Amino acid sequence: MMKPGPKPLLGTAMTHAERQARYRARQEQGAPKLRYRKLADRRSRPQRWRDAVAELLEMQDGYQAWLATLPENLAGSTTADALRLICDLDLEELASVEPPRGFGRD
């Protein structure tokens, strides 16, 4: 049983064999193959660490601004508590850590 979907353009739906034949013909003609792959991250581990810490510091600044502009009626809410916890984290200590460069390169 075929699944419901859009109506075929020519009035009748293709059979599986017709669909496979059309696919093979397209492959023989050299139709471009679409491949979606995540690009390789070429940054070193220390650079990725510094970028991650910088992103965390930037996000913490955004949360501090959010907390500062929070209305007074939300000062005792769980949102405000979560924002305070994030703002109280000492991320500067993370920024001061320099990760090892790797085997034999320290």
Image (cartoon, rainbow, N blue to C red):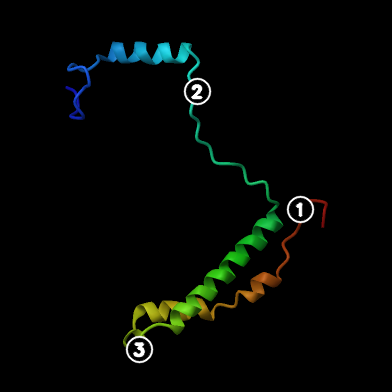
Query: Closer to the N terminus: mark 1 or mark 2?
Result: 2
- Graded by Cα atoms within 10 Å as few (under 14), some (14 to 19) or many (20 or more), the crowding at tag 1 reads few
The amino acid at mark 2 is Pro
Marks 3/2: CA–CA distance: 58 Å
Q: For residue 47, which numbered disc appears in the image?
A: none
- Of all residues, the one furthest to the bottom in this rendering is 72
Residue with the mark numbered 2: 32
For the residue labelled by badge 2, is the local secondary structure a helix, a strand or a loop? loop
Q: In the rendered image, which quarter contains the N terminus? A: top left
Q: Which residue is at the front of the view, 84 or 33? A: 33
User: Which residue is found at the position 42% from the left and 77% from the top?
Assistant: 82
Q: Which residue is at the front of the view, 67 or 93? A: 67
Q: For residue 72, which numbered disc appears in the image?
A: 3
Label 3 or label 1, whichever lies nearer to me, is 3
Q: Is residue 69 above or below residue 30?
A: below
Relative to residue 79, is residue 27 drawn left or right?
right
The amino acid at mark 3 is Glu
Q: Is residue 51 above or below residue 73?
A: above
Query: Closer to the N terminus: mark 3 or mark 1?
Result: 3
User: Which residue is found at the position 18% from the left and 16% from the top?
Assistant: 12
- Of all residues, the one furthest to the front in this rendering is 10
Query: Closer to the N terminus: mark 3 or mark 2?
Result: 2
For the residue labelled by badge 1, is the local secondary structure a helix, a strand or a loop? loop
In this figure, what is the number of numbered marks? 3
Residue 47 image point, x, y percent: 69, 57
- Graded by Cα atoms within 10 Å as few (under 14), some (14 to 19) or many (20 or more), the crowding at tag 3 reads few
Q: Is residue 95 above or below residue 76?
A: above
Label 1 or label 2, whichever lies nearer to me, is 2
Marks 3/1: CA–CA distance: 50 Å
Relative to residue 19, is residue 34 drawn left or right?
right
Q: In which quarter of the image is residue 50?
A: bottom right
